[in-house]
Amino acid sequence: MDKDQVAEILTEIGILLELKGENPFKTRAYANAARTLETLGEPLERIIAEERLGSFKGIGEALQKKITELATTGKLAYYDELKASFPPGLFEMLQIPGVGPKKVKVLYEKLGIKNVAELEAACKAGKVAALDGFGEKTQAKICEGINFRRNYASRHLLVSALSASEPILEVLREHPDVIRCSSAGSLRRYKEVVGDVDFLVSSKKPAQVIEFFVTQPGVASVSAKGETKATVILTGGIQADLRVVSDAEFPFALAYFTGSKEHNIVMRQRAIQRGLRLNEYGLFKSKEETRDPKLLVTCQTEEEIFEKLGLAYVPPELREDHGEFDAAEKGNIPRLLEWTELRGSLHNHSNWSDGHDTLEQVAEHMQGLGCDYWAITDHSKSSFQAHGLDPARLREQLKQVKKVNQRLADEGADFRLLTGSEVDILKDKVDFEDDLLAELDVVVASLHAGFSQNESDNTKRLIRAAQNPHVHMLGHLTGRLLLEREGYKVNQQAVIDACAETGTWIELNANPYRFDMDWRLWPYAKSKGVKCVINCDAHRVEHAGFLRLGAGIARKGWLEKKDVINTLPLDKLLKELKRKRER
Ligand code: DGT
Ligand code: CA
Ligand code: CA
Ligand code: ZN
C-alpha cells in the first residue's frame, strides 16, 4: 500500500475508535498520523526500509507497527477486527453531510439506528429531533443530506472516472487481440459527472479480450460477463461496461455508445431522412431496422459517418444536441481549445493563506512544467478561516514575489510569478481598497461567505464586483461543489451580461469538484464576447494538472483558443490585464 492508502485506513481507524467512545487523544493520534503520511515528501517504502518512521512527530511504536504492517502486507488484523465489530451501515451514515462519528454513536446507542434507511425512518418519525444535541434543524439537515445522496450516490466525478479508466484503456490498447479501443459514453463526452464508464473494443477474439478485461487489477468485482460484453465494478466503486465488436462495426458502435442519447436521436433521424438506417451496428441502405451486412454503407471512422449524413465532424464533447447539428451543417464547428495552449493559471494559492506550498516551490514547479506564468492569488482578510492576508501581509508578499522573480530573471528563466489576490466579495464592496488592488497584477473576486438565499442579492453583489475597474475576473461563479453541494442562487446570465459590459472575465475553475462556471453557459458568454480564464485554484503544486481537465470542460463549452485569456503569452497577457483599468 502507498502512503495515501495507509493514511485512509488510519483515518478510518480513528473514526471507528471515536464510534467506540475511545479517548479523544487516541482517536486524534490516528487522524494526525494519517495527515503526516499524506504530506510525506518521500516514498513511505523508503522510510520503512530505513526504519525512520519513529522520527516523525506523533508516530509512536504502536503506530509504527501498524503502518509497517499495512504498507508491507496491505492488511491489518487490528483494523479488520475493529471494523467487524460494527454494523456495516454505520459507515454509510458517515457519508451524509453533517453526520459525524459523535452523532452516529448517539443515534446507534440511543435509537439503535444501524444504517441510512433506519436513520431516514427515524427522521421522518421525528425521533432524531428529540435526541439531546440534535433538534429540528439538525434533523431536517440530515433528511436533506440523505435525499442528496440518493440522487448522487450512483454518480461520480469525471476525474475519478478518468483515473479509474485510463490505466485500463492503456493495457487494452496494448493487448494483441485488440484492434481499436476507446472510451465512450459520458466519459468520452467529458461530462463533469458520470454514471458509469463505457469502453469499446474491436477484436477478432472477443472472449480473450473479455477475460483479460475482467481480470485487470483495477477491477474489484464482475457483475456480468457475456461473449461480447461485460460489466464490472472498478476499484473506487465506479461501474464499467465493456463491449467488443468487429472492426467493421467499430465506428458505428463508437458513435452510438458515445451518445448522448439526445444526439443519437437526431443522427438517426437524419439517416432516415436520407432513406438510411443508423444503429449501433452500422449505417444501412434500408427503410427498415436491419443489421444486414449486404446493405451496409461502409465507414472506416466516425468522421465518415458524419460525412455521409451531411455533417462536419462533431467532437465528442459537443454531442449533447446543444446546437452541434446546426453548426456541423454549416461547417461552423469551431477548432476547440487544446489544453497545451494554456500557459499558466491566474488563480492559485500558496502557504501564505490556505495553500500548501511556498512561493519558491510554486515557482520552481510551474517553471518546470513549462508554464510561462503563474499568479499567486491568496485569500483576502475576510476569509479568516483560510488565513486570508490583510493589506500589510499582502504588501509583504508582493516584496517576496518580486524577490523570487528577480532570482528567476538572474537565472535567465522564462517564467514569472504574478502577484494577486482572490479578494472576497463582501456585502457592498470587495475586501480591499482600490489603491491596494491597483498594485496587483491579477485580481480575482469571489463570493465565499455570507451569500444570501435570495438570488437577486447574490447577483447584485457579483455585478457590483464586476463593475470594480480593478477586478479582472470573477472566480467560481456559483460556489457549487459537484456531488456535494449546490451553488448559491445567482442569475448567471445577468452576471455574464454585466461582465460583457464592464470587460470583466469569468473564471472556469478547473478544480474537478467545481468546473464553475458550468459548460452549459459558456456559449452564451462567448456570444457576448466575455473571455474565459481557466484557473487551477491550486492549493498544492500537483493541482497544476487541473489545467487539462479545465480545458476539456472549456471544449465542452465550445471555447476556442481566442476565447481563453490564459492562452496568451506573458507580454500580451500583461497588456490585457491593464485594459480594464484604462477604460
Ligand atoms: P452516464 O453513464 O449516465 O453518465 O451517461 P452515458 O451517456 O454514458 O449513458 P450510458 O452509459 O447509459 O450509455 C452510453 C451511450 O449509449 C449513451 O450515451 C447513448 C447510448 N445509448 C444507451 N442507451 C440508449 C438508448 O436507449 N437510446 C439511444 N439512442 N442511445 C442509447
Ligand atoms: Ca456511461
Ligand atoms: Ca454504460
Ligand atoms: Zn481560490
Image: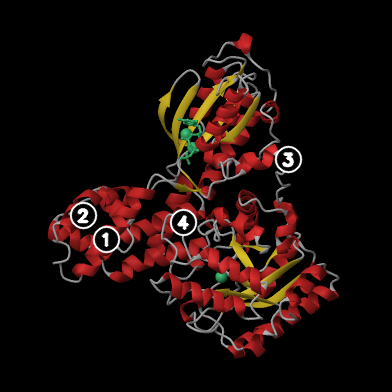
> Label 4 vs label 2: CA separation?
24 Å
For marks 3 and 1 on the same chain, the one whose residue lies earlier in the sequence: 1
Judging by the rendered image, the residue that carries numbered circle 2 is 119
Is 559 in front, or is 448? 559
Query: What residue lies at 17% left-to-right and 52% top-to-bottom?
Result: 121
For marks 3 and 2 on the same chain, the one whose residue lies earlier in the sequence: 2
> Label 3 vs label 2: CA separation?
56 Å
Residues under numbered marks 4 and 2 in contact, where contact means CB atoms less than 8 Å apart: no
For marks 4 and 3 on the same chain, the one whose residue lies earlier in the sequence: 3
Left/right placement of residue 29 relative to residue 395 reads: left
Judging by the rendered image, the residue that carries numbered circle 4 is 482
Nearer to us of marks 4 and 2 is: 4
Which dot marks residue 142? Answer: 1
Judging by the rendered image, the residue that carries numbered circle 3 is 331
Residues under numbered marks 1 and 2 in contact, where contact means CB atoms less than 8 Å apart: yes
Q: How many numbered marks are there?
A: 4
Which quadrant is home to the C terminus?
bottom right
Is 88 in front, or is 13? 88
Depicted 228 relative to depicted 144: above or below: above
